[in-house]
Amino acid sequence: MRTTRLRISMRDVEPAVVRVIDVPAVGSLAELHELFQAALGWTDSHLHQFTADGVRYGLPDPDGHDLAVQDEATTRLRDLPPRFEYLYDFGDGWEHDVEVLGRGDESPGCVEGTGPCPPEDCGGPPGYEDLRQVLADPHHEEYGELRRWAGEPSTFDLEATSLLLRQTVGAVPESVRLLLDLLEGGVRLTPGGRLPRSVVRTVQEHRREWYPLDRPASVEEDLFPLPVLHDILRGVGLARLTRGVLSPTRAAADDREVVRRLRTWFDPDGFRSRLGVVAVAVLAASGPLPRAELVRRVEPLMGDGWAVEGRPLVTADHDTLLVGMDAELRALDLVAGDWKTWEAGPSARTLLPRATRLADLWTHRPVW
């Protein structure tokens, strides 16, 4: 993979916070934002914005009031000049200077860095300086309260940061690669539009947990997640049906594009997708859980204000919706385990950036 090396320097912060990272050269600014969050140590809890040559890039205003902000999802890193700015949290105002250093190594990662990331919501650089002064004096009257709020002092870990950055870049799920390889050259579907038995049984050999009966599968629907995976690949444009033959599209040959398209399957603003992301993150951070315990941990992390048919969501709603996502989460290797006890699948930390970041955060600071 071709990468670009960047130096990110946080403004007005002591000790200095600097990261030198290698990121995919063809990434969008939306993807770059995810990588900056991972590299710096932020939690992606606030708004952000890029600025280059006086032009601002970020999330489009859904109401159309701020037309001066360009869409970060359609802007590539290569479209920006060698120096630009990154702003995180419009309230605290964490400003970062970014410099393009040139070509990076063959794979993404963190090359070097200094300084721990400041705590979220501490008041920007001035508030952080005040916080550091209080925490340096155990006799200060606010020391106890602020120490409990801030937690243990963080440190910069090069190896852990590099791993998190690579996980955030993402990887193609093994299940997706398996089916795309089987479709190579084209596979004629059955008259009912489903995968032929030869493909179904090859998938069964690699995913025996998808069909609990001790006998060969006959049709696509026997392997519970398989028809969902079939639909996902066609829905995101990684497989195309032409005259009854299903084949991978050109995009399927590019791992970065495969990951990018799979991520579009999850609506970032929808409750159902958020529920799946949080559930995957909880499993990745805590290990296998009975489904009831998983729902108990997930529900309070979803926040307030969600409703169905005019009434607030209750525990049973979370359980029903999560069960409804079971097949697609398993199809993308995000969830594994039996039907009663769920566990993180092999793609739990490498497909959905938000789940990756939350899993890392909750691994170090559990919230249940």
Image: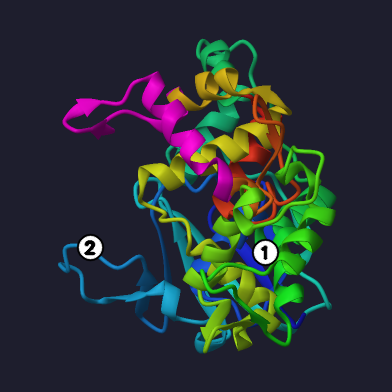
At a point 61% along the width and 61% down the height, the residue shown is 35
Residue at 55% over, 56% down: 228
Quadrant including the C terminus? top right
Q: Position of residue 310 (x, y in %)?
A: 16, 30
Q: Amino acid at mark 2?
A: Pro
The residue beneath circle 1 is: 169
The number of numbered discs placed on residues in the rendered structure image is 2
Q: In the rendered image, which residue does mark 2 sit on?
A: 62
Q: Quick check: can you spot residue 210?
A: yes
Give the vertical position of 226 relative to 224 (above or below). below
Q: Indicate the quadrant where residue 206 lies.
A: bottom right
Tell me where residue 93 appears, x and y as whole percent. 41, 52
Residue 105 lies left or right of residue 43; in this view the side is: right
**Res. 122 mark:** none
| SS at circle 1 | helix
Q: Quadrant of residue 197?
A: bottom right
Q: Position of residue 43 (x, y in %)?
A: 54, 44
Q: Is residue 310 above or below residue 47?
A: above
Q: Which quadrant is the N terminus positioned in?
A: bottom right
Q: CA distance from mark 1 to mark 2?
A: 27 Å
Callout 1: few (<14), some (14-19), or many (20+) C-alpha neighbours within 10 Å?
Answer: many
Assess whether residue 312 is covered by the magenta stretch.
yes
Q: Label 1 amino acid?
A: Val
Seen from the viewer's position, the closer of residues 299 and 232 is 232
Please provide the residue range marked out in magenta: 300-328
Does any portion of residue 40 appear in the rendered image?
no
What residue is at 77 percent from the left and 64 percent from the top? 109
Q: Looking at the image, which residue is at 73% across and 82% down?
A: 184
Residue 135, placed above or below residue 41: above
Asked whether, in this view, residue 345 is left or right of residue 226, the answer is: right
Q: Give how far across and how far down residue 222 sits, in percent.
A: 65, 49
